[in-house]
Image (cartoon, helix red, strand yellow):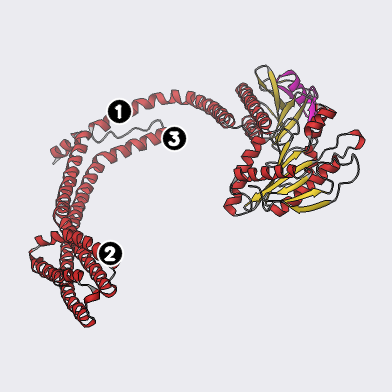
Amino acid sequence: MQAKARAGSDRSLTQRLGRAFIAVAVLIIATLLVTGACFAAFLGHFEPSVNALISGRDGVNEVQNGMLDEESGLRGYLDGGDQAFLAPYYAGQTEILAGDNASISLATRTDLVDEIITMRVAQQRWLSEWAAPALSIERAVTGLTQRDSFLLTGKALFDGYRAASDDLTADVNSDIAGEQTAEHNVVLVALAVSFGMLVFTIVVARRQHRALRASIVTPINDLLTTMQKVSSGDLSARPAGVGPPELREVADELGRMTLTLVEERSRMVGLEAEARSQARRLGLIVNVGREISGSLSLRYVAEAVAKAALTISGFGAARMWIINADRHELNVVHDTELDHGQTSLDVSLQLGEGLVGRAGQFGRMLATLRTGSLATEYRAGTRIAALAVPMIVGARIVGVLELTSADPAALDESSVDVMHSLAGQAATAIEAARFHQSADELSHTDALTHLPNRRRLELDLDLEVARSLRYNRPIACIMLDVDHFKMVNDVHGHQAGDEILSEFGDAFSGSLRETDTAYRYGGEEFCVLLRETDAAAAAVVAERLREGIATRFAGHRGSATVTASLGVAAIPSDAIDAKTLVAAADRALYAAKAAGRNCVVRAAPMRTVRSGGTRGRARPAAGPPLPIVVKDIPAAS
């Protein structure tokens, strides 16, 4: 017994695991083979047989449907005499042919041969003794009594066929049920055998697990207990050194490692703390850099940088200042002491003013020991109440990051370096965000009128028209053109013309809602987008615009007299999409010009709201707007 136990303990861990694996693998393979054999029988015999029976049954049903179609067509032909009634008959022939082909597979079943022959004989009798003669009977030469007798004969033959077909279908269904029952029994047997093999495999695996636990888990637990004692400070702990040879070698090596652990422990504690602190800071810088480098939102960049600065420094509050180079001042874009999304009101500093102003002017990290004290260049380790870190990109200062604390705090050398790095990344992100914002505004704004330009109109129009069509809401468009603008330029000069156009932004603002938008379409032409507005309401707005423009530019104080022609169109009354909406409004604008200018024309129905003066006659240089006359005009093509 002792020799057997000794031999068991000297068996290596690899040998033990190999034997356990072989035992379990053999049982699993046997289970798979038994299950595979059962399912091979299932797939090789039962499934094709059931499918063939189902296909044959469907063919029998298809033949019966074709026979019904033929009978219906022939009866209609015999009753009406019109060969158009024979269409179901010819369609039924196709169904019978397809059904016969599909039901051929039933002929291989010996128990169904008699029923198939009976059904085919009844089918052929009906076809040859009634269906074929029915095609040759002329309704005009057939008496009523003879036709009724013929129809009764056909019904009797068809009933005989249907009875044979129903018997065959019943036998096929019985065979399908039998095959499916046998199929289910095979599946149940396969599952029972597989389950039995699986249970046996679990029993064997459990026994192997117990054997491995006794020879492996217990020594490993002893090693783990020793390691836990050593890690808790008990360096006198030693493993028992039992189990397979590999684990006994591990126990010996653990004892040797314990001797050097004391020397390394004190050194690693200091290095670990320093590494964690540095990794946290570097990780924070990397994360912030990743976040702000992919953002073109100035507010988002400011919030992310301020939050990271508070985490690194431990200060209580942070402010982000941006330099306005035109006015030589700094403006607050974010303050952590305000609620999210709220901005400081009119908070600004001149360059050189206070801690932040001096840091922004000279580009150095400055600090104050106490609130209100003199700003000096910061040295690591000094306790301070406020710190200003300039944000520099290239050789240009773009802003200042201000940190404040109610209780004085200090930054070590590595924190100062991290703050410089954070400020540099922030400066680059802020410049990118400001450049993007400026470029976006320039690309969508007309420089003369400060109104959105045609490019902005196209983007907004596609979006708003899609929303209008989706929710079945009205939307209207007004096209406006300054009357005789070339004459204004020729008489008063191009500068006067530019001044008139630049005033149109104010002229629109007094007559439109906040939800409406005016655009400079090009030259002296403008477009107004009216949301949630139908054609009638848009015409009212257009007339208000016309009157406002005529009053504003009535020639007072020697300025030019200016009027405008307007065309109105709306969805869904006048157009179906953005392109046709603008085209309809543009056609209405040309109709307004043709109607004498200084008027409003609706696209459909096309109406004109016209000044009371004679067509083509200039308005008085001064005085109130002329009365309005409504006249119908023909619709545009």
- The reply to whether callout 3 and callout 2 are in contact (CB within 8 Å) is no
Mark 1 and mark 2: Cα distance apart in space: 97 Å
* 393 vs 17: above or below: above
Between disc 3 and disc 2, whose residue precedes? 2
Is residue 338 in view from this perspective? Answer: no
Q: Nearer the viewer, mark 3 or mark 2?
A: 2
Q: Give residue 217's position: percent from left, percent from top.
A: 28, 40
Residue at (59% x, 32% y) in the render: 295
**Image mark for residue 252:** 1
Residue 204 located within the stretch drawn in magenta:
no
> Foreground residue, 225 or 16?
16
Residue at (22% x, 38% y) in the render: 17
Between disc 1 and disc 2, whose residue precedes? 2
Q: Which residue is mark 3?
A: 232
Residue 349 located within the stretch drawn in magenta:
yes
- Per the rendered image, the range of residues in magenta is 348-374
Between disc 3 and disc 1, whose residue precedes? 3
Q: Nearer the viewer, mark 1 or mark 2?
A: 2
Quarter that holds the N terminus:
top left
Judged from the image, the secondary structure of the residue bearing numbered disc 2 is helix
Q: Which residue is mark 2?
A: 87
Name the amino acid type tagged 2. Answer: Ala
